[in-house]
Image (tube, helix red, strand yellow):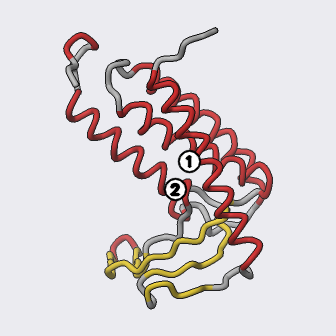
Amino acid sequence: MIKLHRRFKVFFITAVSVIVVDHLTKWIIRSTMHLNQTINVIGNFFTISFIYNTGIAFGILNKNNSSAKTPLLIIFSIIALGIILYIFYSLPRDIKLSGLSMGLIFGGAIGNMIDRIVRGKVVDFFDVDFFDINIPKLNFHMTRWPTFNVADSAVFVGILMLFIIIIVYGGKTEGEIKE
């Protein structure tokens, strides 16, 4: 029997958990809400708003609802998954949080990719108020954070953890890492 290093187990369990929770929450939203319906959770500050995102993270490229870009986004997702696995295997094995952080990123990427393959769009529903940002020269105005889902949250937290890992462990080799 193959004995896997602890970080591989953590990576796998984390990724599968993110995928399951992501799709369970998306199923709940799709089966209990109407498209574009909003439910106030904490006033207008935090709402559950059922939308479809045909773009990428934070609604980028969502303006054009063309289904022609879906195959391109799926190919981009597959390339990103390969890069995530490469980074995971490149990290020193002694960094305990690497399995968790990379599992979050990988699981989130898979979760949204499944939506793109099955529906051609991603279910988003967490909607949070944000302080107003207005940059007239860039024609940019934002009053709410872009609507997101569990997969997006997992990717964000995983990347944040990865940055912390890089800062803390940055040029150390496996033998130099003491936890």
- Name the kind of residue labelled 1 in the image: Gly
Q: Residue 72 vs residue 79: left or right?
A: right
Q: Position of residue 63 (x, y in %)?
A: 62, 69
Helix, strand or loop at mark 2: helix
Q: Position of residue 140 (x, y in %)?
A: 40, 74
Up/down of 50 relative to 89, above or below:
below
- The front one of 52 and 164 is 164
Check disc 2 and report the residue beneath it.
152
Residue farthest along the bottom direction in this orientation: 43
Helix, strand or loop at mark 1: helix
Up/down of 137 relative to 85, above or below:
below
Asked if marks 1 and 2 touch (Cβ < 8 Å), the reply is yes
Give the numbered dot on residue 108: 1
Compute the Cα span from label 1 to label 2: 6 Å
Residue at the spot x=45%, y=23% of the render? 6
Give the numbered dot on residue 93: none
Query: Which corner quadrant of the image does residue 139 belong to?
Result: bottom left
- Name the kind of residue labelled 2 in the image: Asp
